Amino acid sequence: MMWEAPPLSSLQSTLADPHLPIGMRMRATYFLRQEYDNYTKNLDAPTGSDADERKKDDDEDSDDISMIVISTLAKGLADNRHGALLRHEFAYVLGQLRDQRAISALEHTLLNEADDTMVRHECAEALGAIGSSQSIPSLEKCATNDESVEVGETCRLALDFLSWKLNGGKEGDDNTPIACACMLSPYSSVDPAPPHPKHEALSSEEIGIILSDGRAPMFERFRAMFSLRNRGGSKSVKELGNALVMDKSSALLRHEVAYVLGQIQHPDSVEYLETSLRRQNEHRMVRHESAEALGAIEERWGECETILEQFLNDEDDVVRESCVVALDAADYWGYGNVDKLAEEEDGALAKRTNFSLHKAGSNGKASSASVLNNHFNISG
């Protein structure tokens, strides 16, 4: 089903005020992504005189909704008052838009070594997702000279992905990784590495060995991760979960594993994600992603809710806010209550569904709630 978003001006106003509840600002972020997707899809639709008229409209910046969305998110990214969690989400969405007009804002934050590591990491990953050779100099600079291990790793990973892509490592359009049909992604996210076609012949355990090999290139480990994600099932979840709780080589890898487990939404993930979240000495980008992933597992929501509630007063603001957002949104959208109308917000009535499936894109997987895809980019 389609979602009726609040007016664009309302979304802009929400993100202009960093003092509003973070759950409201997070929803506005993904409604903006929906606005961008709807607008750019409509640009491809007109023909004949309608197309000529649309072209005239495009010449007027004030009418370019896609640019308004990018500018609004870029302003949010530059505003430290929003906090690291939401700013990193702004960067993530900008990357998923794959619009080169977002590059300058992302590079500006990436190159500021005084900024938050998690935000800068997400900017680097977003530049990789956009996939333009224009970003190579900035990525190369941070890949070799950055003081942050996580930022340096992300930049090297993005450079490896760009090298793979620019050397023809794709089939068809940009969404299609070079892999056989059974290994292709059921998710609409732009991933930092493609699955490897050779993994089709390997068992989940064998792919898990590649994922867990701290001596292997990070790009190859990420390819193993996404091969396991695309394969799915309890055996793949076991390999991913073991990497999350046993790896000691890279917080970047562990945080991506947590994200992938959130995409899969398999109930067997809960124990691994809980273990990760409970580790006070774990990097906050890993704990944050584990919290959001727990918010995605509807089948065991009662248990996940109890776990998340225990971290509402966590000392780390990013972890604390991640739990607040997951719980707030689950309450707002309401697991399983798709036939009830939510309260009116900014003049728009939206149907209730779980937050993880609402963090909005436009290619949503049809679950029992038949909802939009989310932060985890679950597609049909």
Image: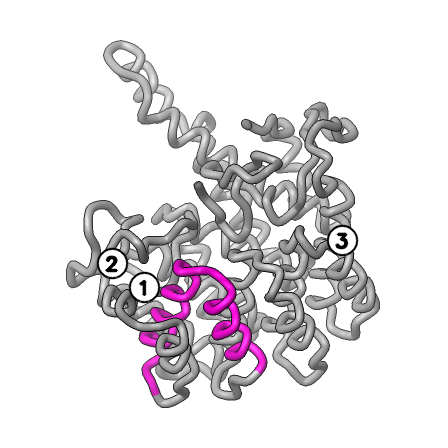
The CA span between labels 1 and 3 is 32 Å
Q: Position of residue 13 (x, y in %)?
A: 67, 37
Q: Is residue 307 left or right of residue 206?
A: right
Residue 327, placed above or below residue 162: above
* Of the two numbered discs 1 and 3 in the rendering, the one whose residue sits closer to the viewer: 1
| Residue linked to disc 1 | 195
Q: Which residue is mark 2?
A: 179
User: Disc 2 marks which amino acid?
Assistant: Ala
The stretch of residues the image draws in magenta is 216-245
Q: Is residue 40 left or right of residue 358?
A: left
Image quadrant holding the C terminus, namely top left
Mark 3: amino acid: Leu
Which residue corresponds to the image point at 47% horizontal and 28% vertical from the top-left?
Answer: 62
| Residue type indicated by callout 1 | Pro
Magenta region includes residue 43 = no
Q: Earlier in the sequence, mark 1 or mark 2?
A: 2
**Residue in front for this viewpoint, 333 or 349:** 333
